[in-house]
Image (spheres, rainbow, N blue to C red):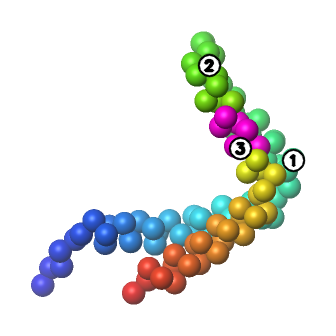
Amino acid sequence: MLEELTVFEVMRMALLWLSPIFFLVGMFLLFTKEEKHHKLESVLGKEMGILNKKLIPRIENNIDIFHKWLIRKRAMLGLFLIVYSATLFIVLKK
C-alpha cells in the first residue's frame, strides 16, 4: 500500500539529505585558514551591475559584524556542524 506523505516525513527526508552538506561545510570551516575565507569572500562578493546602492546599510552592517564573529569562531562552528550532521544522520535514518 501507498504510505501517506506527511509534513514531518518531508522534513525528515530534507534534513537527512542536507546532513552531508552540513558535514562538508563543517570540514571546510574546520580545516581552512582565515585568509582563505577572505579570498573566497572577495571573489564571491563582487557586485555586478550599474547601481551599487546600499538600501539598508544598518542591517547590512549588523550582518557583517555577525559574519566576522562567525569567521573568528570558525573552528567551533565547524565542529558544531560536523556533530550536528552526524546526529541528524544517526537519528533520522530508519
Rendered residue at 71%/44% (across/down): 67
Q: Quick one: SS at disc 1?
A: helix
Q: Quadrant location of residue 87?
A: bottom right
Residue of label 2: 54
Name the mark nearer the viewer: 1 or 2.
2
Image location (x, y in percent) of residue 33: 86, 55
Dot 1, how many residues are within 10 Å of its Cα: few (below 14), some (14-19), or many (20+)? few
Q: Residue at x 67, y 34 (%)?
A: 62
Check the image and report above or below for 49 versus 64: above
Counting from the top left corner in percent of width and height, residue 24 is at 65, 65
What is the CA distance from the residue labelled 1 to the residue labelled 3?
14 Å
Q: What residue type is labelled 1?
A: Glu
Residue 23 as seen in the image, left or right of residue 14: right
In the rendered structure, does residue 65 fall within the stretch colored magenta?
A: yes
Q: Residue 77 carries which label?
A: none
Report the number of numbered marks: 3
Residue 27 visible here: no
Residue labelled with disc 3: 67
The residue that appears at 50% across and 65% down in the rendered structure is 18
Range of residues picked out in magenta = 62-68
Give how far across and how far down residue 78 sits, in percent. 72, 64
C-alpha gap between disc 2 and disc 3 = 18 Å
- Identity of the residue furthest to the bottom in this view: 94
For the residues marked 1 and 2, what is the alpha-carbon distance in whole angstroms? 26 Å
Counting residues from the start of the chain, the first of labels 1 and 3 encountered is 1
Pointer 1 residue: 35
Disc 1 or 2, which lies upstream in sequence? 1
Q: What residue type is labelled 3?
A: His
Sequence-first disc among 2 and 3:
2
- For this view, does 35 lie left or right of residue 10? right
- Frontmost residue, 19 versus 64: 64
The structure residue drawn at horizontal position 73% and vertical position 38%, both measured from the top left corner, is 65
